[in-house]
Image (spheres, grey):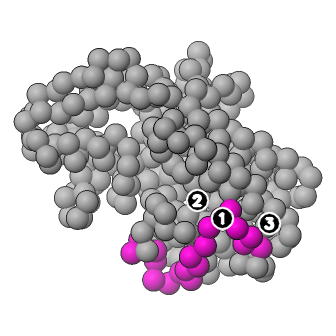
Amino acid sequence: MRVIVSGGAGFIGSHLVDRLIDEGHEVVVIDNLSAGKKEYVNKKAHFVKKDIRTDISEELKGVETIFHIAADPDVRVSAINPKNSFDVNVAGTFSVLEACRKADVKRLIFPSTSTIYGEAKVIPTPETYPCAPISNYGASKLACEAYISSYAASYGIKGTSLRLANIFGERSTHGVMFDFYHKLKKNPNSLEILGDGKQDKSYLHISDCVDAFLTTWKIQKIQYDVFNVGSREKHKVDELATTMCKAMGLSPKFTYTGASRGWVGDMRLMLMDTRKIEGLGWKPKVGFEEGVNKYVSWLQSEKN
């Protein structure tokens, strides 16, 4: 089957491309390389350097499915530059949906985020819980979900939104683990932790994330659906730091910036109810410490 992956040169997208090619699909990657890296794109994929905010309807002709991964992915940056978050995520997704409508694409899979729930009072948080994001990034993803739902109902584009926990692993070039690694490389004796270290969240390795994309793509039956994707465990930032240090063979002193949140829009507590997607046969296979060890090994092998 011929499929398109927007953002296929990025962290999640490039891993998804690898798996699709392994399964025998013909894959076209659309990416403007603003965040992704050309070297992450599988050599068997056809690469098109293009911005999703431009018309991609020609590229979509004859395509049954698009995995729309391209986005401005950083919660912290969205607080500093909210316009870019809106332009890339919301306007970009609208542009992709319009191209799907023109090219008669039947299927769209979209990575949303756990941050759309904001400060949820029900933990683990189910898909039916009201969404009240506290970050610009979360707001942009929720707006995208609304547009996908609308286009599914109006134009027959079968849509899926996967509300992802904190995804980590090889090829990730931002986020708290990436930051910890580089801080420790610079000073192995001390590690500054943003906030108080008590932020408690769910983390999921990239390979399990890709499994979720493929599972819902193959099994979902209704016109539009949403799924929480994460582990059943949560880990405090302190624990994450300790696990990273263990993987690197270090024992630094931890210092804290002192606030209850690491940055504007940071969620202090996040754990989603994943029983819905588990009902399709999906479940995480990579444990937290195993995943951290894999990521650290990759970071140590790369020129990051």
Highlighted range, magenta: 39-57
The chief SS type of the magenta part is: loop
Bin the neighbour count of mark 3 within 10 Å (Cα to Cα): few under 14, some 14-19, many 20 and up: many
- What residue do we see at 72% from left, 28% from top? 128
Q: Which residue is mark 2?
A: 70
Q: Which residue is mark 3?
A: 100
- What residue do we see at 23% from left, 64% from top? 303
Asked whether the viewer can see residue 278, the reply is no
Label 1 residue SS: loop
Q: CA distance from mark 2 to mark 1?
A: 8 Å
Instruction: Please name the amino acid that badge 2 sits on.
Output: Ala
Q: Which residue is mark 1?
A: 52
Q: Are marks 2 and 3 in contact (CB under 8 Å)?
A: no
Q: Earlier in the sequence, mark 1 or mark 3?
A: 1
Nearest the viewer among 111 and 228 is: 111
Instruction: Please name the amino acid that badge 1 sits on.
Output: Ile
Disc number lying in front (2 or 1): 1
Label 2 residue SS: loop
